[in-house]
Image (cartoon, rainbow, N blue to C red):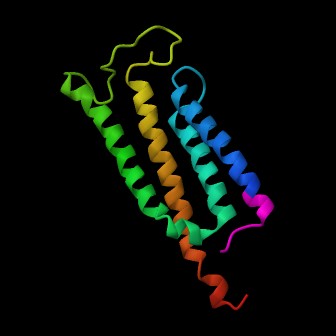
Amino acid sequence: MAGMTVIVRTISRILFPFIFLFGIYIILHGHLTPGGGFPGGVIIAASVAMLILAYGLERVLKNNAFMRAEVLDTIGSLTIAAIGIMGLIFGSYFLQNTLPLGELGRLISGGNFLWLYVGVGIKVTAGILLILFAMLFATWGEKDDHGA
């Protein structure tokens, strides 16, 4: 999988930061507007997948992106678990809000929700990328094996 044409690579490189930032916006404003960790994580993963498909799997292997996705998957899981355990530590329930709520309509006003959405966003992004890598690695050698 050598990648796409110069036009596709150029457009992907131009669009990537905008799509990536939109995913971050969806994650950070998920407790105020429709969105959150899952849709924001999917958008970020789609922006990275666009680059992977545009530039080819060899570049992904060279940059060690699979290992980075595994590390991010672990960080996302640990973030979600830590926020959940904070509720237990402070004498409440798992995932119970323990941080102050703040002022209504402000970015940092949802207590634990903002940080939970950040953890979910990281976890979803890494999970979808790991699924993409698994599919790409499974079909990588098939083109050469079948003589096509």
Q: Is residue 36 magenta?
A: no
Q: Quadrant of the N terminus?
A: bottom right
Q: Quadrant of the C terminus?
A: bottom right
Q: Is residue 3 magenta?
A: yes
Q: Is residue 114 left or right of residue 27?
A: left
Q: Quadrant of residue 98?
A: top left
Which residue is at 51% across, 69% downward? 62
Position above or below: 7 against 62: above
Which residue is at 61% across, 42% downward? 20
Q: Nearer the viewer, residue 19 or 141?
A: 19
* Residue sitting at the far top: 103
Which residue is at 58% across, 45% downward? 44
Q: Residue 139 placed where, x, y %?
A: 60, 76
Q: Quadrant of residue 19?
A: top right
Which residue is at 69% across, 52% downward? 13
Q: Residue 33 placed where, x, y %?
A: 59, 22
Q: Nearer the viewer, residue 97 or 122?
A: 122
Position above or below: 61 against 22: below
Q: Residue 143 placed where, x, y %?
A: 67, 83
Q: Residue 60 placed where, x, y %?
A: 54, 65
Task: Report the number of discs.
Answer: 0
| Magenta segment | 1-9
Position above or below: 97 against 127: above
* Residue sitting at the far right: 7
Q: Nearer the viewer, residue 7 or 37?
A: 7
Q: Is residue 108 left or right of residue 143?
A: left
